[in-house]
Each structure stands twice: as C-alpha cells, then as structure tokens.
Image (cartoon, rainbow, N blue to C red):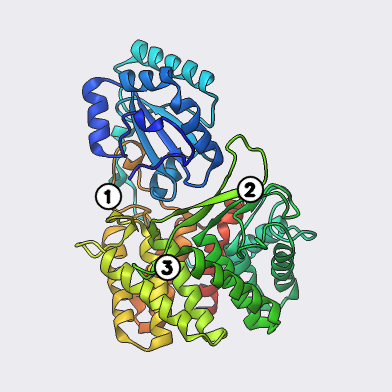
Amino acid sequence: MLRFSPNPNRAHLIPWMEWSDEAFRVAREQNKPVMLYLCAFWCGYCQRMDQEAFSETENIALLKAYFVSIRAENAQRPDIDSRYNQNGWPTIVFMTPLGDPIVATNYMPADQFEDLLLRVYMGHQQGQGNASAIAAYDENAAVPLQIIAQPGQAQLDEITAIVMHLADKVNGGYGDGQKFIQPEANDFLLARYEATRDPKYLDQVRLTLNRMRAGPIHDDKDGAYFRTTTGADWTRPHREKLLGEEAGLLSNCLRVFKTTQEPVYAEMADDIIRYLNRKLYDPDKGSFYGCEDFIRTFPDGSGEEFSTIIDRCIYTDANAQTIRAYLDASLLLGKEEYKEAALSALEFLWTDCRGPDGGLFHYHDDAPRVCGLLNDQVQLGLALLIAHAVTGEAKYLDRAKDLAEFVLMRLKNPSGGYYDICTPGQAFLKLRLTLIEQNGPAASFFLELARATGEKRYRDAALWAYQPFQADFKEYGIHAASFGIALGKWSQSQ
C-alpha cells in the first residue's frame, strides 16, 4: 500500500509502482531508467518531497513519460533500505532498466530535482545498452569455510572497547552528536555488567536512562520517548516514536530495575507501557502499530502545535520485541495483563503473519506482506522461547523449532552466517547479505533454543552465525552491540 504525506500534495499523480519483478520488466521493455524513492513514514523531508518536488507539474510529467517510479518505505522494506539507503531519508536512487545504479541523492527542492531528472534521462539516452554487472553475480560461487572458528574473548573485548569508546560519559547515550535510542548498546553493557560485575557498565546505562528521563526526548504529555534528538544532551527532539525503539528501551528499564531494584526504572517501564497501550495498541488484531508521527498543525512550520498520525502496519520484528518486553514486565512488575497482551500479539503473528512455507511475513496491513526476512524469524523465535519459559506451554517451543528449521533450510549462507532475505530479487536484491546486526540475534536465538531443548545442532547453528565476523568490528560501530550480546551468551555457555 503506497502512502503519501498527510499534508496537501499531488505526489499520487505519479504512476508509482511497488518494488517488483513487474516494475523492472516494464523498465526493460520500455527502456526507461528506474527511480527508486526510499522514504520513511515519519520523515519530515520525505513529506516535503511529496509536497514540493513530486507535486510540481513538470516533474510529474517527466516521471510519467521517461521513468519507471518505484516507491518503498524503510519500515515496510528493510531489505531495500539496507541496500540503497544513502545517509538517511529520503534516498532517491536512479538505475538503469537492468538495475545498475546511476546516481543517488537525498532531499532536493523541486527545481533542482527537475534538473536532475533531465540530466539522468539525457545520460540514459546517450549511454543505453550497458551490460549489468549485477546480473553476473552468482552467490553459489562462494567457497564454504574449511575451518569453523570458535568465538573468543578477544572479540568480546574488542566490541566492549568500541561501545565504551562511543559512550558519552557526560550526557549518556552514545556518540558526541545527535542522540538516538540505542537499546542494543544498553543491553550489551548490562550483559557485560552481569558477566563481570564491573560497575562502569551499569553506571553508563543508568546515566543514559536518567538523562533521557529528565530531558526533552521524554514526552511529558503523552509519555514514552521520541526517536532521536539533534542535541547531544537529549534536547531538540525529532517528534516521532517507533515501536521497536520503545520496546527496546522498555527492556532496558526492566533489566536495570531487576538489577538495582530502584523504583524509578519500574516507573519508566510503566510509563512506556501506558503509552503503548493507549496509542499503539490495535485491539482488533491484539498487536501493536508501527509508530506515531507528529505533524505540525501549520505546514509552514510556524507554531508549536502538533497533530498525530499512526502507522497502522503491524511489523513482525517490532511486535516480537514488544512481546518479549511485555513478558518480562509481567514477571518483574507483577502485572498479569501484560502477559495476556503479549500472548495475544504472539498468536496474531503466528496465525496471520505466517506463510504456507512456514516463514513469517514482515508486516500486515490489510494482508500479510514480504515473506522470509531473517530478522522476523529470529526475533519472533526469541519471543516464543520467552513465552515457553513464562507459560510452560510446549506449543511455543515447538513453534520456535519450526522457525529454526525455516532459517536453517532457507537462509543459511554456505560460507557462514545467515542471509537477510530468503529469495533473491531484482537489482541489488540479487545480492543476499549476511549482516552483523541480524546474525547477532540469530546466534542468540539458536543458543537459547539449544539451552531449551538440549539439542547440540542448535548450538552448531549458533556457531555458524559467528563465522563471517571474526575481527575488525570497528567498522560496524555501535551496530556491533547486538553481535556482542550473542558473543557474551556464547562465552557464558562454555
């Protein structure tokens, strides 16, 4: 389902297509370059593109006549986002009909965008007939690993050093500029504290949570936390709230409360849950919407009054994270209704977001869509294992084993690790990626499943997820944290 800015615009007049084989077939048959517009539901500059560049008569005419226009949202298509995102949203990528990239850019005013359209069209006319380098890619040419390396303490120490180097010792959080909610980094440091009892790890997370609670990133009116702030001191927030980030932060608060027994962290957790129940819970599906965005009442940017819009898609990975957090909350805060909400969401995902091949779809609007992404399988797998531990019901363990089989059969990379997508697609989606931020949770899932079942083959499956990532974690920055969590679990399991 294509969505546009909630403010007045004419972007819908462009003959948009979704990313599909059909879109690239049309491009090849008509010899037209492809324009991929990658946006985010909550992104203000994306909304401005709809209202400005995509509403100008000349640009609409050029796109109708000379381009195949594809529109994709980052949350609905993380597989596209991970391959094409260039420094944020919107990202606009022009490609040949065969899918080879021509040029990429971000937000542009209407007149500059018109100039770019003309230059891309003229360049395509002059350079048509180029062969596709992507078409020659053969993932089966990869050479399987000969030696299975065991994860070691050195890798864990390297990631610990990276995260602590990025930790802001004054304001909390990570990095010295714009601040984001970073639940995985917090979880990693909490795991390091639990393993070592070194107080600096717990102190950093407590500092982060305390500064967030006291700063403008916390919504004092409706509760919960905005996605990011421009200020390093948690000031000047961007006013959107995403389910996955809220769920991750909820888990952080619960874990610190469990460790310290300080009531303030239970209060933070309750604040987030009250917000999620009030603003993002879908009573019809028994699950949670994707995000809440805040739109200025006056589109020219004047004034400080906002109205809100809700992304009513049900995202499997974000709901799985929420289920895990709610199950933890039910135990730590003594609220049976949190467990009931979690199990209701779990049932919806299993019955309504699962394909005939056993794999999970990524999201559900009026129907389930985009099947076979690794992160959905492992995140729900982790949620199922917690549900089994909390309820003792065997069906949750059986379902986790079903998802494990899907991952092993459909997503295993013969050279080590697990692919992010099940089936190759067009252009850069021909390239199935093995991503550190997804293989960390995959390793954690298989380790937890091995512990729950006693089956060594799941431990071997966890070991396989570690294989592509042996050293040089610095290039991944804070995104290495989720892999570090899995390394810590491996170390503890020895």
Q: Is residue 10 left or right of residue 129?
A: right
- Label number found at residue 255: none
**Of the numbered discs in the image, which one, if any, rests on residue 423?**
1
The answer to which image quadrant residue 66 occupies is top left
The residue type indicated by label 1 comes to: Thr
Callout in the foreground (1, 2): 2
Direction from residue 257 to residue 285 in the image, left or right: left
User: In this view of the protein, which residue sits in the foreground, 385 or 242?
Assistant: 242
Tell me which amino acid carries mark 3. Answer: Ala
Kind of element beneath mark 3: helix
Image height check: is 263 above or below 101? below
Q: Position of residue 432 (x, y in %)?
A: 35, 47
> Counting other residues with Cα less than 10 Å from the Cα at mark 3, is it few (<14), some (14-19), or many (20 or more)?
many
Residue 286 seen in the current view: yes
The location of residue 476, given as percent across then percent down, is: 57, 51
Work out whether residue 148 can be spotted: no
Give the alpha-carbon distance from disc 3 to disc 2, as whole Å: 33 Å
Mark 3 and mark 1: span between their CA atoms? 23 Å
Q: Is 479 above or below relative to 95?
A: below
Tag 2's secondary structure? loop
Q: Amino acid at mark 2?
A: Glu
Q: Quadrant of residue 414?
A: bottom left
| Residue highlighted by disc 2 | 305
How many neighbours does mark 2 have within 10 angstroms: few (below 14), some (14-19), or many (20 or more)?
A: few
Secondary structure category for the residue under label 1: loop
Q: In the image, is residue 488 above or below residue 355?
A: below
Q: Earlier in the sequence, mark 3 or mark 2?
A: 2
